[in-house]
Amino acid sequence: MGLFQRNPFGHILFIKKWLIRLFGLLTHRRYRGFNELQIEGSEIIKNLPETNVLFISNHQTYFADVVAMFHVFNASLSGRTDSIKNVGYLWQPKLNIYYVAAKETMKAGLLPRIMAYAGAITVERTWRSKGIDVAEKKQVNPNDTENIKLALQDGWVITFPQGTTKSFKPVRKGTAHIIKEHKPIVVPIVIDGFRRSFDRKGLRVKKKGILQSFIIKEPLQIDYENETIDEIVEKVEYAIEQHPSFLNVISIEELEEQERLNKLREWEV
């Protein structure tokens, strides 16, 4: 790799490699130390092609979810099975991993801007602005969809189809359009425990000793030509366990969050 070799977005790969190494070293104990990351399905990662892979996942924090994925993917590619033991896997990280993130989130401070260089594809939210739902949905920026296309052509893309860290929100149809148009291999991931471990941004450790789960599922079987957008959306909701039918299964994490909110309401009264 040349010293000034760049990816399709103009990022110098040498700088990106060192950013991944640095952030990886700084965050490793968040998943293997302060808390414990329980991984399932890492063998699936090893068998994926080099490009045109789309990871879909539920979302619990702004940054900790993505950072965990960088750890798990690189550890798996380095031969570890369901483990991120020994952070040496970061020495030669996979440099064509990208993640979709809201533009306003990645511009909110110096640290997010630096992290964006490690692989963010920033998009403008069409349904939300500054944390508030907008009455009139904005037009999709064609540059956003083109950037996702470029990223898939170059490597792997991580996306959170619900577009929010709140549980059981509807999957955005934009993800289904990407799947139908670019025909990537779609790999579902289901995470849990991150909301209890970290603050909402995923930058601060909120609670230690939490068992975090990270389940990688088999790629989805999709008929790209004949399945409708709504059918793909429903398939995605089931795959990442965010379909309304899962509401009947309330996790301990959700119960604790409800209890916390009830206490806050009591204090307000």
Image (tube, grey):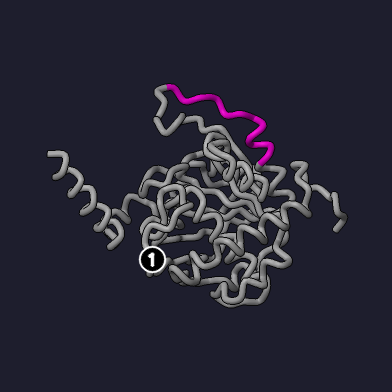
Q: Residues within 10 Å of mark 1 (few under 14, many from 20)?
A: some
Quarter of the figure with residue 268: top left
Please determine whether, in this image, residue 111 is positioned above or below residue 44. above
Please determine whether, in this image, residue 143 is positioned above or below residue 240. above
Please determine whether, in this image, residue 204 is positioned above or below residue 40. above
Number of marks in the image? 1
Quarter of the figure with residue 21: bottom right
Quarter that holds the N terminus: bottom right
Residue drawn at point x = 77 percent, y = 52 percent: 13
Residue drawn at point x = 54 percent, y = 75 percent: 82
The answer to whether residue 52 is seen in the rendering is yes
Element under disc 1: loop
Residue 159 in the image, given as x and y percentages of width and height = 55, 49
Range covered by the magenta-colored residues: 136-147
Most extreme residue toward the right is: 2
Residue 29 in the image, given as x and y percentages of width and height = 51, 67
Residue drawn at point x = 59 percent, y = 69 percent: 44
Residue 40 in the image, given as x and y percentages of width and height = 50, 72
Q: Amino acid at mark 1?
A: Lys
Q: Is residue 189 magenta?
A: no
Quarter of the figure with residue 250: bottom left
Horizontal side of 107 relative to 200 (left or right) equals: right
Q: Which residue is mark 1?
A: 208
26 vs 72, nearest the viewer? 26
Q: Is residue 143 magenta?
A: yes
72 vs 248, nearest the viewer? 72
Please determine whether, in this image, residue 167 is positioned above or below residue 80. above
Horizontal side of 237 relative to 157 (left or right) equals: left
